Amino acid sequence: MRRQTVIAYWLIPSEPARSFFQRIINDLARSYDAPVFEPHVTVHVGADQTDAAAKALEEAARECKLTGLTPLGIDESDEFIKTLFVRFAMSAELRKINCIIRQATKDSPQYELKPHLSFLYKNLESATRSELAASITMPFSEIPFDSLQAIRCVSPTQTAIDVEAWELIAARTLR
């Protein structure tokens, strides 16, 4: 698969969920020699357009309100960026944010929105991933999200070096 530079649009959890997720990410990164990253749900991935990214976040922040997502469970996969993650139910507000960003950036609708928040980016054996997934208890029935970020990154992200190279392009707060 060809790798390219893209802009990923993230929804960022608010407190206390943000600190809860960051603790899990930090602990797993330390235990498995994996990269540390900010907790986020990717709402869109599109072309590398800095000006369009800032405009898209501005529009989304103006038109969308604080949103909450319902966790459906902890899962694991053999995909590097979805080693261990919490799946979320789709919501109308999440679809709206995705649509606003996609239209503002004039990106194609190729990105498939599957709301999740990753805890770990690492290639691990299936048994280890399953054991880790079973060990995490979600203390929230709904996770609040209060801000958006645009991150320049390489796609697909495949290594810790790729993660460490992520660059924040723009950020906006939802009201």
Image (spheres, rainbow, N blue to C red):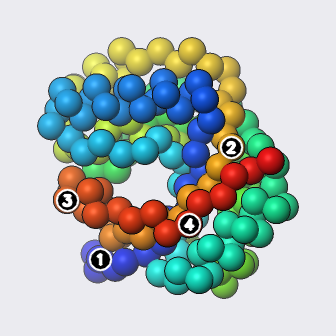
Instruction: Please tell me which residue is depicted at 39% across the width and 65% down the height of the picture.
Output: 167
Q: Tell me which amino acid carries mark 4.
A: Ala
Q: Residue at x 67, y 20 (%)?
A: 141
List the residue tagged with mark 1: 3
Look at the numbered disc 3 and give the secondary structure of its residue: helix
Camera-nearest residue between 20 and 82: 20
Please state the horizontal and vertical placement of residue 91, each as a whole percent of the image.
Answer: 75, 45
Q: Residue at label 3?
A: 161
Residue 17, by quadrant, is top right
Residue 130 lies in quadrant:
top left
Task: Give the mark nearest the N terminus, 1 or 3.
Answer: 1
Is residue 72 placed above or below 79 in the rendered structure? Answer: above
What residue do we see at 30% from left, 42% from top? 36
Give me the disc on residue 170: 4
Instruction: Inspect the image, locate mark 2, and give the three-letter code of the amino acid beneath it.
Output: Asp
Disc on the earlier residue, 3 or 2: 2
Decide: marks 4, 2 in contact (CB < 8 A)?
A: no
**Of discs 3 and 2, which sits in the foreground?**
2
| C-alpha span from label 2 to label 1 | 31 Å
Q: What residue is shown with label 2?
A: 146
Residue at (33, 70) in percent of width and height:
154
Q: Which element carries disc 1, helix, strand or loop?
A: loop
